[in-house]
Each structure stands twice: as structure tokens, then as C-alpha cells.
Image: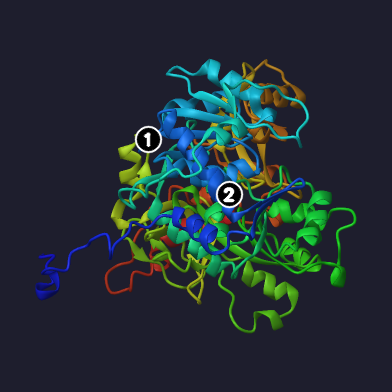
Amino acid sequence: MSSSQGQYSIGLDKNPANYVPLSPLSFLARSASVYPELTSTVYEGRTLTWAQTYERCKRFASYLVRRGIGRGDTVAAMLPNIPAMNELHFAVPMAGGVLNGLNIRLDPAAIAFQLNHGGAKIILVDPEFTGVISDALDLMKGPKPLVIDVDDAAFPGGQRIGEIEYEAAVASGDPDFDWQRPQDEWDAIALGYTSGTTGNPKGVVTHHRGAYLNATSNILAGNLGQHPVYLWTLPMFHCNGWCFPWTIALSAGINVCLRKVDPAKIFELIPKHGVTHMCGAPIVYNTLINAPGAPKGDAARRIVGLIAGAAPPVAVLEGAESIGIKLTHVYGLTEVYGPASVCAEQPGWDDLPADQRAQLKRRQGVPYPLQEAVTVLNPETMQEVPRDGETIGEVMFRGNIVMKGYLKNEKATKEAFDGGWFHTGDLGVLDKDGYVIIKDRSKDIIISGGENISSVEVEDVLYKHPAVLFAAVVAKPDTKWGEVPCAFVELKEGASATEAEILAYCKSVLPGFKSPKSVIFGSIPKTSTGKIQKSRAARTGGFCEGDFGVIDLAVALRGLRFATAPQGDGNKAKRHPEVRAQRSRASLEG
């Protein structure tokens, strides 16, 4: 097919006057120019303007270039939600680099893998994490990165392990540094790692174009408007804070930085700075709802909150309203820059009773404003499932807010994009309104406090215990974390082990949040071919039916072939005997 548009292709080429690669770096430059004296950042008594933030970013970018950082070089950061972490989202790409935000909950082995795999040339570290970073550097096999300390007076303790401190590096930089836009808007801007479904995680590479578009989408989906006051309850290392560092720059808002989620501190900062917006996993909002002294009713300041992670419980949605937070549910993954779908509210929802409104708002929803599509497809036919709320398929995305691919993993990238859609691995349905509703994770992912935990990874650790014969790990509902790992263990004949011993063993190998919180001993149910039946194990544990709901539905459906209906039946897969029979078995087991 010819790409020519005839007369419209002659003498009408791109040039610097009519085409500029999209990049969220332009947001910072604009706000610094248009609103130089407006506050950009507040943290522990410190205040910065947009002009100051822009200068600081230029200074550090010039320092990075002086230290050899250029196009395509990786700069890692192990930092909490402090001003420096926000600034790195601009300074690193200004130097042509790619920012790799490290999960502060990871252990040294996981960090060492990411530093090796991503090829980080520089790493910035907070004093709270110098111990784990030191251990990670010792485990590295390749060249070690230059270490830059980022001191924080709000954290007493820790020690410096770097060559230079961040503020000194900023001060040494050029305030008039002539940074360059990316050569191509497809250039990488960030590297983020998935939690991993079978051990080592995959490196998700995102680009300037997608970051620009999703940052803009956040304003539309979250109703931020101009000059919002945004409280950083969402980790900036997580999907680049859902692109909100760039979003707040675009809207010339205020970044209210927060080192850790502390309800007392949060309720102090909200009225002090006039917070208007925030984001977080269900655990964050649940913590605030149940915090002593949480303001209620008229005493609560009205805030708009985005919530993601596991589908928020109705109690959380209702409880948030009681403390003044109106929640909007968003859904996404690292591969789609964080949130890329939203449960778009419809006229009349606010007039419904709280419980009915909450049921509607907990759906994963429709595409983000600048995302092309999100839907549920039969992964074998790549046809959309009926909008009946029953026929299960795989949730898939398509559009400009989708990653470039997985770093150094062409096979996984090709599989993820098979059929021209990004395969999330999540099982879901479409309701009559066309809203996506996730039923479960197809690879037994446990979502705990907004972090993904691979049950396979935990099982691998359990199987290494000398007394363990068989092991199965499932998600168990938890009032604080949403879900936590629960281990089912069948011991070897003649062997013995206590729950305390198994838990201690796991904690010696795994990060705390990945370790099981309880252990149930006994014979683990298996199929005739020897496969472990997790759904029956969960039912034995007493939390599969009732409060456990559909958590294990995907286990029964994981091997589902999504057989298509005979021709002439409208591809209504739920009517096909094979699918119908398997769904019935799944219902009985789960």
C-alpha cells in the first residue's frame, strides 16, 4: 500500500517549524517560563518555585553529562518521595539518559539483577537504603555504577557510600545548560521492572511520546485542572509515579512530597497545603479511613483520589467518601505507564446510594482519554467477548500509551504484542456498558499493598526447604494489605516443621512483603495427572468461598483454551460446550 497522499505529500515535509518530538520535558520548561514564581514543590519546610526546579534540573543534567551520561545511558535511583526523585524525572532525560526507579522494598539480590541488566552507570541513593545498596553492589557481576548520596534531614541516621552528595552535584552544574529534546519521541525515557512471574523481572522500556500522552491523560481522567496541589502518597519509583511528576509539571501544580505514608502526617499536610489530589493503592486509603483522628464529614477537606491495585473493596470506596476523598478507580500495568484505563463516571452516579455507587466505581473501566483501546478479547480468536459480564477473556491494550517492549528480551516482547494488542495476562469480562471488569490474574499474581507478588517465586523458595514435599501459594484477603501470600505445605514423610520455622525460612530468603503470612499444613489436593489444585487448597483453608470470592477463579481457568463458538453463533464463546463445561467446573472448584 502506498504511503503517498498525492498532492499532500509534495513539498509538505516535516521541519523544525512544524514538527517537534513530543516529550514531557517541555512541560517543565513551559511552567518555569509561564509561572516562574509559583510553588512547584514543598517538603519538610522547604519550598521551591518552578523557576528554581527548572534550574536545579538543568544543573544536575549538566553534571550528568560531565560524568559521561548521554543518549541511552541508564541512571538508577533508590529514593523515597523527596524533591530529588521528582527532579530526576526531568534531569536524567535532559541529559539524554533513561531513568530506572528502583523499588525501595526489594532485597539486594533483586536490585543487583536490575542494576546489571539495566546497565546503570550512576545510582542515587537515600541514606535509609545505603545498606541494601551496598550489599547489592557487592553482588553485581558487571561494572559498578557511580554512587551519589542524596541526604535528607528528615531521616536521621544512615551513612554516605557515594562519591558526591546530590546537592553538591546540583551546585556544580550549569544553570544555563542547553539541554536537548530527544532526537526521536520514540527514544526511551524510563526503565521499570515488573515484579516478575517466574523469578527475575522483565525490564519495561517506555518512551517520551507515551510519557507525554499519559501525563496529559492523567489531568483529564483525574480532573486535575490547572494548579492542583498533589500529595505524593504513591511511590515515584512505581511506574514513574504513574507519570505524575510530568503531570504536575504540565498543570503547574504543587508537589507535596512525603517520605512515607504516615496518616498523622498526611492529615497534617492536607489542610496545611490545601491538597486537592492524591493517588494510591487500596491499602493507603484503608489506612487513612481507619486512622485515629481521621477527619469525618464536614471536618474533612474534599480531595479527589485515584485508586488502583486490586479492585477496591466496596468498604474502602464508601469509607473514603466519609473522610472527604472521592475516589476514581484506574487500572494499568508497568507496561502501559501505570494507569491506562479509568472507570469513567456517568451522570447520575452521585445520586445513587453509596453501596450501589461503589459497585459501579470498582470496575476497571474504559480507555484513558489518550489511550486508543482497552477491552477483553478471546486470546485465540482475538475477537472481543460479548458484553454479558460472564464470558471470560484476556484484558488487552492498544495505543500510544504502551511500552516499547522488554529490555533485552525480544521473545517476551513479541509474545506480549501478539496479534497487535498488548496482552496483560489478566482475565476479565465486559459488562453491558462495555466497561472492563477483571476477574483474576492469570498467573496467580498476588497484589499486596499495590505490589505484585509471584506465587511461583514464593513456591520455589518453599520447595527448597528440606522438609517440604509440595507447596502452593495463594492470595489470602487481608484488611490492611488487600491480599497477602498464604502457603499450603505438604511435608515429606517423616519430616517435621512448624509454621514459625517455615515463615522464618521464607523471610531469610525473600523480601518481607513477599513472604507468606501464614502456613497451612496438610495433604495438598492434586488432579489425576499430579497437578496441584490451588482452588481446592484455598477452600480447605477456609477462605476460598465467601470472603475469598473469585481470587482463585483464574487458577481453574488458567488452562482454558477459550474455544470459539461454531460459525454462525456470533463467536459467543460461552455457548460453546467445551468452554461452558470448563466454566462450570471452575465455578464448582472456586
The reply, left or right, for residue 271 in relation to residue 238 is right
Q: Which amino acid does label 1 sit on?
A: Gly
Q: Reading the chain from its start, which is encountered first: label 1 or label 2?
A: 2
Q: Position of residue 117 (x, y in %)?
A: 42, 28
Identify the residue under disc 1: 70
Q: What element carries label 2?
A: helix
Disc 1 to disc 2, C-alpha distance:
21 Å
Against 406, residue 317 (above or below) is below
Q: In which quadrant is the N terminus drawn?
A: bottom left
Does the image show residue 60? yes
Q: What element carries label 1?
A: loop
Q: How many numbered discs?
A: 2
Q: Position of residue 553 (x, y in %)?
A: 56, 53
Q: Which of 321 and 559 is in front in this view?
A: 321
Q: Position of residue 375 (x, y in %)?
A: 43, 65
The reply, left or right, for residue 239 in relation to residue 509 is left
Res 82 quadrant in image: top right
Q: Which amino acid does label 2 sit on?
A: Thr
The reply, left or right, for residue 287 in relation to residue 452 is right
Identify the residue under disc 2: 53
Disc ID at residue 412: none
Residue at 51% from the left image edge and 60% from the top image edge: 33
Q: Which of 384 and 367 is in front in this view?
A: 367
Q: Where is residue 226 in the image (x, y as percent from the top left)?
A: 59, 69
Against 28, residue 522 (above or below) is above
